[in-house]
Image (tube, helix red, strand yellow):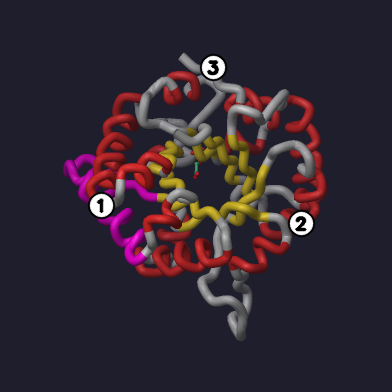
Amino acid sequence: MQKPLIAGNWKMHTTVHEGAELVLKLREFIKSTDSIDVVLAPPFTSIQHISHLVADSGIELAGQNVFWKEDGAYTGEISAQMLRAIGCSYVIIGHSERRALFGDTDDRVNKKAHAAVKAGLKPIICVGETLEEKEAGRTLSKVKGQIMRALAGLKTGSLRELTIAYEPIWAIGTGQSATPETAEEVHNSIRELLYEDYDTSAAKKIRIIYGGSVKADNIDSLMAMPNIDGALVGGASLKAEDFARIVQFESA
Ligand code: PGA
């Protein structure tokens, strides 16, 4: 089993100066990263600067998005190699905001996952259902479909470096987190799907993390669930004390 993974997705928040301040405070509050993988996903403009500030801290960096081509005439896009070169080891792919606002289809998510793996970045692939889909009882079919299409064609060996983030869209930024039991049920089904489709040792190593209104006061109960391997944190990752408390969750 891998270490738990707690990732902070800063979204389009913080200038380079604000980001630096946040990281310096975080370094004060986070005592140790020995038993946990801590990942920050700042805006692209801050990553390189922050990579110097987290050196020797155990904190790793992620891009919030990536384009699947290596280079070329793609104005405004950033490649996986470019992210690697400025110190990223992870990349978030298919966040629901990218899917809803910027046209990230399952096919694009799949291309981005391939590009990330090829460049040696560890993908964090986001999946999740809308409120309407949840109410229609379609959570599992939606999430399973997204995962199968995202992972299509990826070799078992590369899956070891993979994280799936289950982020119900109705829980993102709403303050209304899924209950630990509801999240666990979905995580468990995702785990079963991975066991069906991949060999056991590869499936075991894939982390399934939860995202959607994760806060200092609900992280302990979420992390007490056997199939919740970590969290993808939005709003609360912008407050150093809160994020540090989330990273230092109390295990049951
Ligand atoms: P939130 O965002 O923690 O603010 O709900 C989570 C996410 O979008 O990854």
Nearer-N-terminus badge (3/1): 1
Nearer the camera: disc 3 or disc 1 = 1
Neighbourhood count class around disc 1 (C-alpha, 10 Å): few under 14, some 14–19, many 20 upward = few
Nearer-N-terminus badge (2/1): 2
Q: Is residue 73 above or below residue 208?
A: below
Quadrant position of residue 211:
top left
Dot label at residue 250: 3
What kind of element bears circle 3? loop
- Which residue is painted at 35% across and 47% down in the image? 128
Nearer-N-terminus badge (3/2): 2
The one nearer the camera, 104 or 108, is 108
Kindly indicate whether the residue at mark 1 contacts the one at mark 2 (C-beta within 8 angstroms).
Answer: no
- Residue at the spot of label 1: 197
Residue 146 shown in magenta = yes
State which region is magenta: 127-153
Residue type at tag 2 = Gln
What kind of element bears circle 2? helix
Question: Which image quarter holds the N terminus?
Answer: top left
Neighbourhood count class around disc 3 (C-alpha, 10 Å): few under 14, some 14–19, many 20 upward = few
Residue type at tag 1 = Asp
Q: CA distance from mark 3 to mark 1?
A: 33 Å
Dot label at residue 48: 2
The one nearer the camera, 251 or 236, is 251
Q: CA distance from mark 2 to mark 1?
A: 37 Å
Kindly tell me whether residue 213 is visible in this rendering: no
